[in-house]
Image (cartoon, rainbow, N blue to C red):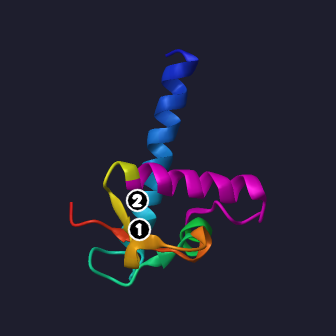
Amino acid sequence: MNLHQRGTELINQLKEHVLEVFRSHPDAGPGQGGALQEEIARRAGLHSMGTQELDHTCREMLSVLYKEGKIEPVDGGEGDAKKIRWRLTQE
């Protein structure tokens, strides 16, 4: 496996990890009230050190999952990105 393939595999594993956090969160299921980025990051272990890089990593994963149609912002997702609540789509 080359480095590019390994990077793609790691990203896919991280996306699945974040989706698992959504599935286990009582407010992040389809039709629920949603969970804040900070809650998702904390549950995923991407906020434990409180570094800007980990926060950015979670935000990027949310963006990718949103573009893939796997999650959606609650109430249109307007305003401060950290205050947006996210939930799984109906899939």
Q: Do the residues under discs 2 and 1 have CB atoms within 8 angstroms?
A: yes
Q: Which of 37 and 8 is in front in this view?
A: 37
Q: Is mark 1 on a helix, strand or loop?
A: helix
Describe residue 17's horizontal placement relative to residue 42 as left or right: left
Q: Where is residue 70 in the image (x, y as percent from the top left)?
A: 32, 57
Q: Which residue is drawn at 49% across and 16% down?
A: 1
**Which residues fall within the magenta stretch?**
44-66
Q: Examine the structure image and report whether residue 11 is included in the region drawn in magenta.
A: no
How crowded is the residue under tag 1: few (<14 C-alpha within 10 Å), some, or many (20+)?
many
Quadrant of residue 86 in the image? bottom left
Task: State the residue at coordinates (41%, 79%).
Answer: 34
With 48 as the anchor, is 86 left or right in this view? left
Q: Mark 2 points at which residue?
A: 19
Q: Mark 1 points at which residue?
A: 22
Quarter placement of the C terminus: bottom left
Q: Tell which residue pokes out farthest to the left in this image.
A: 91
Counting the numbered discs, the total is: 2
Q: Position of residue 75 (x, y in %)?
A: 39, 79
Picture coordinates of residue 72, whole percent (x, y): 36, 66
The disc labelled 1 sits on which kind of residue? Answer: Phe
Task: Tell me the tag on residue 88.
Answer: none
The secondary structure type at the circle numbered 2 is helix
Q: Is residue 22 above or below residue 67?
A: below
